[in-house]
């Protein structure tokens, strides 16, 4: 799976055997445009590989949708709080485009990390990036205007305008 190799290469060089070890764990799932990868009030036990597509992560408060982030394949995603604390998620993840997705039980990825230092390094570096991006986003919500945040999103991901025209 070339997209997995592309994703992993941002963080670590995996051997063909290590890539195959991860690929063999991934199960294809069907998520059509405008459908959800997962929804709030459910328990999350899986890690999702979003091979292609654009996704919106949002929550609902008092009947109003609040988009918290956009995801662009190839990447992995889950609600780590739900997985680790065994609580229901408050998040919804919706496909905004046609996409190709896979899932793997989180415990199986944990076992693969225990077997391979490179796979462990891949996910540690990826989690580190998620943390850094999360902090930057929190600061941006306080320091930047909504217009500035959207300008940055479009600059980093111009393909989003093809899917979500600005009004």
Image: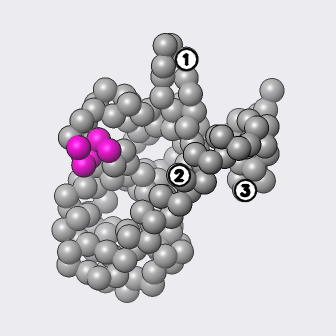
Q: Report which residue position mark 1 lands on.
A: 64
Q: Is residue 39 above or below residue 24?
A: above
Is 58 placed left or right of 155 in the picture? left
In the rendered image, residue 8 lying in the magenta stretch gets the answer: no
**Crowding near the residue tagged with mark 3, few <14, some 14–19, many ≥20 C-alpha atoms within 10 Å:** few
Q: Indicate whether 95 appears above or below 137.
A: above
Q: Quadrant of residue 67?
A: top right
Whole-percent x, y for residue 105 in the image: 23, 53
**Gap in Å between the C-alphas at discs 2 and 3?**
16 Å
Q: Is residue 103 visible?
A: no
- Residue 156 position (above or below residue 90): below
Magenta stretch: give its range. Answer: 81-85
Residue matched to label 3: 156
- Relative placement, left or right, of 23 versus 58 is left
Based on the picture, tell me whether residue 83 belongs to the magenta stretch. Answer: yes
Quadrant in which the N terminus is drawn: bottom left
Q: What residue is rendered at 45% in x and 81% in y?
A: 12
Q: Which residue is mark 2?
A: 134
SS of the residue at dot 1? strand
How far, Cα to Cα, is label 1 from label 3?
27 Å
At x 29%, y 41%, the residue is 82
Image quarter hosting the C terminus:
top right
């Amino acid at each position: 799976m070339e997209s997995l190799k592309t994703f992993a290469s941002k963080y670590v060089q995996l051997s063909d055997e290590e890539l195959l070890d991860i690929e063999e764990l991934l199960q294809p799932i069907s998520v059509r445009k405008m459908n959800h990868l997962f929804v709030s009030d459910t328990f999350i036990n899986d890690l999702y590989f979003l091979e292609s597509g654009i996704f919106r992560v949002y929550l609902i408060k008092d009947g109003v949708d609040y988009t918290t982030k956009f995801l662009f394949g190839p990447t992995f995603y889950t609600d780590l709080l739900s997985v680790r604390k065994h609580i229901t998620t408050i998040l919804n993840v919706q496909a905004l485009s046609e996409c190709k997705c896979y899932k793997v039980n989180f415990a199986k990825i944990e076992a693969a990390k225990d077997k391979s230092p490179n796979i462990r390094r891949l996910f540690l570096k990826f989690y580190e990036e998620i943390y850094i991006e999360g902090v930057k986003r929190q600061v941006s919500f306080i320091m930047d205007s909504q217009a500035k945040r959207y300008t940055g999103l479009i600059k980093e991901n111009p393909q989003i305008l093809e899917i979500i025209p600005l009004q």
